[in-house]
Image (cartoon, rainbow, N blue to C red):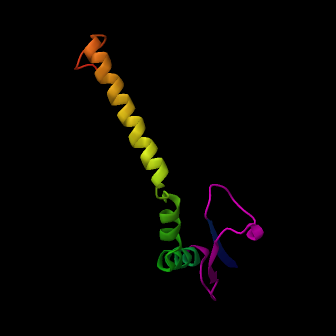
Amino acid sequence: MLIICICIYWEGGRPIRINTGFKVTIMAVEVKKRKNETTGAMFRRFTRSVQQSGVLLGARKRKSYKPKLTKRSVRERALRKLKILKERERLIKLGKISETERY
């Protein structure tokens, strides 16, 4: 019996073919059944080798990766916030909303 784990990582939001130009990393963990070894023992050895190889740790890091915001998006976000604050101040001066009211 042979257990092989192949983890494919990709940069982007969906599975890709290898020839699309994205960076692809393949890490394999291979465990062969030894003589007089139970399947449970082999599976425990396999899970230990996967943990030691760092495959799962790398996959978890890539799963929660968020790209850095561009200068343009940061600027637009700040301008949007300023616009909302100015509109809120205007409505408070006109008496349409109270100062404690949030929206």
Q: Residue at x 48, y 57 (%)?
A: 64
Residue 25 located within the stretch drawn in magenta: yes
Of 37 and 81, the residue lying toward us: 81
Describe residue 19's horizontal placement relative to residue 26 as left or right.
Answer: right
Query: Is 5 rendered above or below residue 11?
Result: below
Q: Is residue 102 visible?
A: no
Q: Is residue 88 visible?
A: yes
Q: Residue at x 71, y 69 (%)?
A: 21
Of 10 and 78, the residue lying toward us: 78
Of 30 and 89, the residue lying toward us: 89
Count the marks: 0
Determine the residue located farthest toward the left in the rendered image.
100
**Which quadrant holds residue 24?**
bottom right
Q: x%, y% of residue 75? A: 43, 47
Magenta highlight range: 11-40
**Which quadrant holds residue 16?**
bottom right
Q: x%, y% of residue 55? A: 53, 73
Describe residue 60's horizontal placement relative to residue 25 as left or right.
Answer: left
Residue 33 located within the stretch drawn in magenta: yes
Q: x%, y% of residue 32? A: 65, 84
Query: Is 103 rendered above or below residue 9?
Result: above
**Which quadrant holds residue 37?**
bottom right
Query: Is 86 rendered above or below residue 71?
Result: above
Q: x%, y% of residue 5? A: 64, 73
Q: Residue at x 52, y 59 (%)?
A: 63
Q: Residue at x 66, y 76 (%)?
A: 3
Query: Is 82 rendered above or below residue 74?
Result: above
